[in-house]
Amino acid sequence: MNTLLKNLCVGALIAAGIFTLSSCSKNEDNSGKARFQVALTDDPGDFKAVYIDVQDVNINYSDSDDNGWQTLQGFKRGRYNLLTLVNDKDTVLADAYINTGTVKEIRLVLGDDNWVVTNDGDSVHLQTPSGQSSGVKLKLNSDVVADVLYKLVLDFDVAKSIHPAGGSGKFILKPVIRGFMEAQGGAIKGAVLPDSVLTAVVVLNGADTVASTYTDHGAYLIKGVDAGTYSLHFIPTDTLFNTAIKDGVSVTLGQVTAVDTVRLQK
């Protein structure tokens, strides 16, 4: 790669906000863990709006319904209008790094600030049975692998979850939620020597940039890459070194592809 093209590539990475040494902080070392996102979406119901008060999202690696629950880091507590999450839209409730293993269950904990807006424009507080104070639990039994990004979508069925309360204009909330989890592509990891040279690693599909990162003491890890075959370009920030290229890097869904160590040449 000539000097002009090399500078353009590095400049594009800087403009994209990727060139940040803070990402190399050892305080943010999540190696050996999986990245786990939880998103909320909706099957529509016959209302103008449905507001759900989400207080917590927990996961459980054990078979116990009473013990072992862990709050996901990065959880966003708040009230969500489910009817804005239709037509394949969703909102991320949590984005966390979790331990590997088998996630047995997930639990969505709701508060009391749940409302519907009827087609007549009336705002009606949703009554919630006391038995739901422990949260809505879903069986998953899904294996998670280190260094892979997973996304769990919680599909809230409004039509089946909200019921009239004796024809009095009141409604009862009994959540019916379907959960499905999938790996978001695969991952690529490797190392670049000398490890003292900060190097941009760019994943290319033909001429299109798919993903990119910088090395951290020579190591790199790129997650969420779609299954396929790619070319990796290693662009050192020290212009005394030449760009290196590895072609034919294959990525498999839900797996981590280990690339042979690259040695930069002057």
Image (cartoon, rainbow, N blue to C red):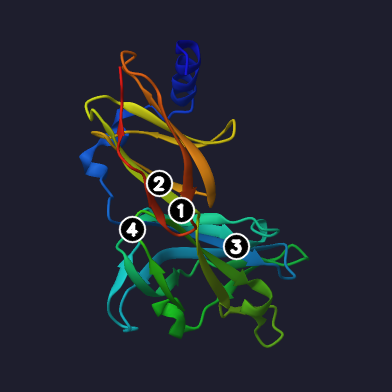
Work out whether 225 lies above or below 202. below
Mark 3 or mark 4, which has the lower sequence index? 3
Write down the residue under mark 4. Answer: 146
Q: In whole angstroms, how far apart are the C-alphas of marks 4 and 1?
A: 11 Å
Front position in the image: 200 or 173: 200
Write down the residue under mark 1. Answer: 186
Residue 68, position as x, y percentages in the image:
27, 76
Side of 124 relative to 204 (left or right): right
Side of 91 relative to 242 (left or right): right
Write down the residue under mark 3. Answer: 41
Classify 10 Å Cα crowding around label 2: few (below 14), some (14-19), many (20 and above): many
Number of the front mark, 3 or 4: 4
Mark 4 or mark 1, which has the lower sequence index? 4
Write down the residue under mark 2. Answer: 188
Number of the front mark, 1 or 3: 1
Amino acid type of the residue that numbered disc 2 sits on in the rendered structure: Ile
Amino acid type of the residue that numbered disc 1 sits on in the rendered structure: Gly
Question: What is the tally of numbered marks visible in this picture?
Answer: 4
Residue farthest toward the right in the current orientation of the protein: 120
